[in-house]
Amino acid sequence: MTASALLLALTLAAPADSGLGGYLGGLSDSTDAYFGISGARPDTTSFDSLLAVGLAQPGGILNRGPVHFGPAPWVGFNRVLGPLWGASLTASARPLGALDGRLGYAAGPNLWLGGGEYTKSWGRRPRASRGYATEATWTATVRGGRFQGVMDLDRRESVLAVARAFIWGTDRQHYLLRDGVRASLIRETPSLRLGLEARDELDSPLDVTASWNLYRREPVVPFNLPARLGRVHELGVEGTVRLGRAPAWIEAESRWADEAWGSDLQFTRLRVAAAADLPLGNIAALIPQATWGRLAGRDIPQAAFYLGGASSLRSVPGWSLGGTRKALARLDLLTSTQLFAPLHLPPQLPISLGAFGGVGAVWGDDPYGGPGSPENEWPQRNEWLVEAGASLLYRPGLPDPRGHLRFDWAWPIGPGRGPGRFTLYYSRPIDLLRITSR
Amino acid sequence: MPPRPALPALAVALLALAAAGPAAAAPAAGPTMAVEDTMTTEVPEILVHAPRVTIDEILERVMRGEARRDSAISDQQFTATVRLVRDVGGSKPPRLMEESVWRVFRKRPDKLRTVKLREWSAKPRKDGSSDMDVEFSPNTGERLITFAFRPDARRDYRYRILGRDVVGDHLVYRIGFEPRSTLEPAPSGMVWIDTNEFVIVREEVSFRESPVPLLIKGVKRMIVERQRAGEHWVLARALMRVETTIPLPGLGSAFDFSIRYDDYRHNVGLDDKLFTSDESQ
């Protein structure tokens, strides 16, 4: 018998898994040595009797109480509401969904705000793996009450905007009041996100009531663009699709309000956007984004398109330009945090650098009352706003794992443009559309 | 006078000693083992025509292997032990802070029942309950270990073969994975794949940067192990050591989070009556 034949015979004679078991056991032993008591087998004394008692109960979750309550403060500040003082209470139960109720008092206009929102999701996976599922998740939301809304339907700032308005008076968003009911249904897979939304709300203008701030500076925007008063019966659809295996997405959204449905305002709003995340090895990513929108409807500022500021053209003051047509394209180059590994920065300070360029324009009817420009013609070459800039980014991981705190310095390019602008804001790197979960 | 050995002969002898290693250089006391030189073997050269298995083929087979593994389970029950341990990896002895033990019952397609067998806390609330909230899924797909190898995840990760180990009659591939996007705080790591069934038998996960830098300095080590329970490969343990940027109340600046899975039973035909509607999803 040759040596190889002997070895083969010995191998075949051994139990099929003994080799693999020993191999994995060796690896597992090293895990034991590292983690110690964390991975040890539990003491199973009395488990049989406890299991018998537990199975006699209606269900494990009922023992813990099916409803979880989450109280939280609801506070805010801007130039139309002044300080907002309030509280919210969320009641959630896994099979039933979550009910959120909130009530607040806006000290500026002496107005009570609040209402309720019910959210129910299906097909959610455990937190550890959420976002990698192939199955569709559904989320239904119904909200009723009186809430403050923002004029720009495509973006809004929240926490940082409150802090800036309160400390320095740099509150550039325009606001309106919405009373009524809205409902939405969203279906999402890793490749496709579809949404349907309907609302029956009374849109009302709001006046500026708070011109003060902590540093006693003049508010950068001393007025609030008045919304057109009217009950709006609106239907909206939106869809975002990932393009096969490529890290690229296309989004389309349309909203309609029609007098035939009893709406005081009549308009059709369409927006499309595209974006990609193109890695350049392990050191950087190139992020091209573009969006285009058109509004058919006269004198409806709450449905118009706006340009300027964070997540837009950063060399233009936020929301300072508006129109019934909009086109915007941006290209961001963001370095990986790994690029700074040689600097041995603390792990809690993962910073990266970026460079960007952008071009955009709004035209058509001007919601700010300007002369406007023809809707059906693209702007002249000199009406396009062009910029370039640099960014310093920090990703805190909260509240959004993909969100960055961005310090952007943008320089306008072209004759007659003002000086560069510094912008501090929080956003995802892809911010002109909502990418599907990965 | 004996003749002096020739220099070349001495050099050959020294070389032979060096090649034989230190054991031969220092002969031990006791019987001398003769070198077997009568049994020779010759293996003829074989020209391999088949192309070497590619990473794409391995990934395809893993996808099918995992799907086959999952589809073979119609119902499942196991005991899960969830622990939080503080003061790990330092000079102080580790301290168990929270432990809960559950018997979990699952049945296809979406039935789930959990029975809490123990809840222990080093700092219990007044009502005796613990701060730890545990949620199980009715799914038997074990995404905790397969997340980077699911069909829809392949476009978001890069893979490469890191090594192969022949273990008995098993060939185990070690495959590394990392997210394609530099913007994504997704984990990277390495899996061990048993090519007999093309299932993942072990995974080590790492994060190139902290998922939550504001609070977590880093995940120092994360390991997910599988075990063979009868005919099925199933989760054995998932362990993670986390270092925080600031000491967290009750957890300190380094803690372990672990889930251990024991006492599996499969396909026993669990009765639908066992499952209450409040947990079935």
Image: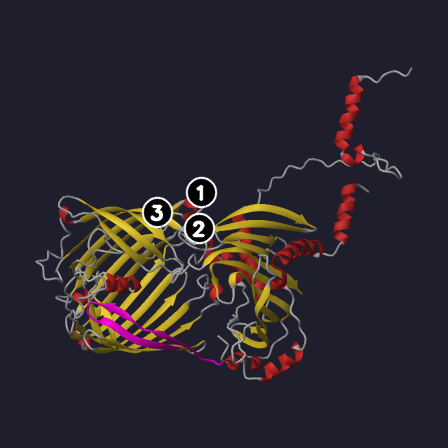
Is residue A231 placed above or below A127 in the rendered structure?
below
Q: Gap in Å between the C-alphas at discs 1 and 2?
A: 11 Å
Frontmost of labels 3 and 1 is 1
Q: Secondary structure at mark 2?
A: loop
Q: State the extent of the magenta-drawn residues as a range.
A: A65-90
Query: Is disc 2 surrounded by few (<14), some (14 to 19) or many (20+) residues within 10 Å?
Result: few
Q: Percent from the top left, x then y, of residue A16? A: 71, 56
The numbered dot on residue B227 is none
The N terminus of chain A is located in which quarter? top right
Callout 2–callout 3 Cβ contact below 8 Å: no
Whichever of labels 2 and 3 marks the residue nearer the N terminus, that label is 2
Q: Percent from the top left, x then y, of residue A373? A: 10, 56
The residue labelled by disc 3 is A353
Mark 2 belongs to chain? A
Relative to B34, A216 lies left or right: left
Relative to A344, A369 lies left or right: left
Look at label 1 and name its amino acid. Answer: Pro
Is residue B261 placed above or below A94 in the rendered structure?
above
Residue A88 drawn in magenta: yes
Looking at the picture, tell me which residue is in the foreground, A280 or A26. A26
The residue labelled by disc 1 is A342
Q: Percent from the top left, x then y, of residue A273? A: 28, 56
The residue labelled by disc 2 is A346
